[in-house]
Amino acid sequence: MDLAYGPEYEAFRAEVRDFIAKNKDKAPRRFGVARPSEESCAWQQLLIEHGYAARTIPKEYGGYGAEPDILKSRIIAEEFTAAKLPMGLANQGISMLVPTLLELGTEEQKKKWIAPTLRGEVIWCQGYSEPGSGSDLASLQTKATEDGDDFIINGQKIWTSTAHAADMIFCLVRTEPDKPKHEGISYLIFSMKTPGIEVRPLTTMTGHAEFNEVFFTDVRVPQKDIVAGRGQGWFVANATLKHERGMLGDPNQAGTRLKEIIDLMHEETIDGTRLIDHPVYRDRLVQLQSRVLAMQFHGLRLLTAASKKEDPGIARLIVKLQGCEINHQLAALAIDVLGEIGVLYGDSPHLRAHGSWQHRYMFDLGLIIGGGTAQIQKNIISERGLGMPREPKPAKA
Amino acid sequence: MEFGLSEDQKLLQESIRGTLERVSPLERVRKIAEAREAEAPEIRQALVELGVPGMLVPEAQGGMGMTLLDAALVAEMLGRFVAPTPFIGTAVMAPIAIAGAGSKSQQEAWLPKLASGDIVAGVAVSEKASGARDGAGIAASGGKLSGKALFALDAANADVIIAADKAGGLYLVKGDAKGLTKVRLTSIDLTRTLTELRFDNVEAEALSSGDVKATLDRMIDAGRVTLAADTLGAGAMMIEKAVAYASERKQFGRVIGSFQAVKHMCAEMASELEPCRSLIWYAAHAFDAIPDEARLMAAHAKGMTGEVGRFVARTATEVHGGMGFTDLMGLHYWFKRIGLDRQLLGSPERVRHEAAAMQGWVAAD
């Protein structure tokens, strides 16, 4: 046990702090969810130049080219969070497509796509889920039929969060309909400007259209833009999903939220009594504090394992399930603390924090479902983590 | 930055595991429990040979001068094997009391004997850690103690007792002191003793060096962290047993572990318990190296592990179905071990209230 980072890392931390002190005025207030502003792109460029974004991506592909060092990455995250500054862009292109291309793309694909994606010039969306293929993603039916050097794509995708703003899509399509379901899928990248693509906003329970549906009608795209070859799509997608689950359930986000609730409970009163002085609400707060702290220390444990290239086993598999559940419960406590005010929404009088607690409470339920539902997570934990038997395949009708 | 166990700590835990696998199998635990002995001499002897009683005793007094994290790793194994042997009172809390508040001569007199395993120390601080019940409480007057202390740990056969009086002072009493009566309390858990100590004008030595209040707090913190670790070990074993049972037991023509309803119970247990491990490691490390955080983290570790322990104990029993409910499988020894850990030295509700108070969230009365 040694929670000190040591002199080399503290020197690095000092560099990061120095950068922040000198440059914090250039930071955009927020990145926006879909297409970054010019200001955001300039900030991203500045971060890449200093190695605070795209840190380990090779220079030739537009990154900073540092050796992977998970502790340095963490220090960057700690310092930016402490200064309440946005980190680099974190869209699906950067978090999912770029690592996938680095791992499995051709040299041409890497050269063409990674740098503009990192700069925020090319925005991607992810075409995985379909109305009939959610948890059972491998059953997806969007067809890509060969036609000369092209594929003709027909089908529908859902939960494509940035589709309305995206330039490009990385998409799972069925190229070999006669093969078993996992072997007939290919991972294809193509332009969202291609004729025959229709994007419709998908409004969720929050009242906002955080997602889209994407319809493909005879969309003609070149065959050469497959990643890792025909029939390899399932393998490629799993490489990508690994990157997505790593992002969901971040314990430091829960730590920030917990602080907000502590403040809220000191500010809000019922009949003149502060909520922090109500033993029942306070007990719920302390229970959640235990869980948030536990997951933060758990994060340190995983970080240590990663830095030693050890497999933390089941400890890693529980993060999405636990993290998303805790976030949801934090939002629930905030709503309960607010009582009737807690259900106000939109632009109502008496609204607190722009209605963000209700929004988070609902949106977090979406995150419990998305990226592999809680039930799928439990299958993974029990089968891969505890070695329990898989569900027997249903007998063929 | 390294948040994890050192190679030495992994070896320590493996050696304790290996020893307990040998000396504390279920048949032996059952025999000790059924005979209402609660302490198996050969398990104690095996732990003495490994130096366990002296882990937290400073090296200058013949101990190993190890950390609370080391002690927590041992506690985890003791919980895993529901080992019927004294530990948290005699090997964790008592050395902290004597090293922290004992005079030089008291340290010289008692710590080497504790370290060598020649004596066992009981600890009676429940009234300070959990609150007084049934009129318990000890008053000190003119070097003599009167009153009663409930739920003393490791005290049944103790050669010496460390007790806290109502004012939070610490006292050392000989196990055979005149006027001291030990009344055995029978709990659900037959692998550890609980004792009521009645004091009728009993001669006592005050442990009054340094900041006694701080030493009492540290005893309680260390006790809480090691109780949490005991539950961690017992809970992990219950999950393993549940998974193994579910992978063998067949109903409806298939192993029940292939039903999602059963698998998900196991996944939930594991995903609740594993963060407790991280929290316990941190709390133990805070006790050793981050004094400002030690009290709060001990309370969090005790509270959360107590809650998760209860969930795991009942869920693992349910996975075993009717067999889990019987005495035949012996699963109930773990269930009860976890049940006792939860209540001792501050229930989850109590420690959460304390955690709130430590952060200034409870208005002073």
Image (cartoon, grey):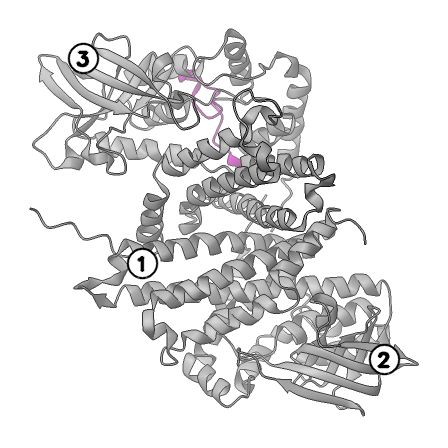
A146 over B14 or under it: above or below:
above
Q: Of helix, strand and loop, which mostly describes the magenta segment?
A: loop
**On what subunit does the disc labeled 1 rest?**
B
Cα distance in 3D space between marks 1 and 2: 56 Å
Q: Nearer the viewer, mark 1 or mark 2?
A: 1
Q: Pinpoint residue B220: horizontal percent, then vertical percent.
A: 70, 65
**On what subunit does the disc labeled 3 rest?**
A
Q: Which residue is mark 1?
A: B262
Disc 1 crowd, CA 10 A, few/some/many (<14, 14-19, 20+): many
Amino acid type of the residue tagged 3 in the rendering = Val
Label 2's element? strand
Q: Pinpoint residue B27: horizontal percent, then vertical percent.
A: 41, 83
Observer-nearest of B149 and A2:
B149
Q: Pinpoint residue B315: horizontal percent, then vertical percent.
A: 41, 63
Cα distance in 3D space between marks 1 and 3: 45 Å
Q: Is residue B182 magenta?
A: no
Q: Is residue A62 magenta?
A: yes
Amino acid type of the residue tagged 1 in the rendering = Val
Disc sitting over residue A219 in the figure: 3
A282 over A81 or under it: above or below:
below
Label 3's element? strand
Label 1's element? helix
Q: Which residue is mark 2?
A: B205
A19 over B273 or under it: above or below:
above
What span is colored magenta in the figure?
A: A54-71
Observer-nearest of B263 and B247:
B263
Q: Marks 3 and 2: same chain?
A: no
Q: Looking at the image, which residue is at 87% across and 78% down?
A: B140
Observer-nearest of B41 and B59:
B41
Disc 2 crowd, CA 10 A, few/some/many (<14, 14-19, 20+): some
Q: Looking at the image, which residue is at 65% across and 47% down?
A: A282
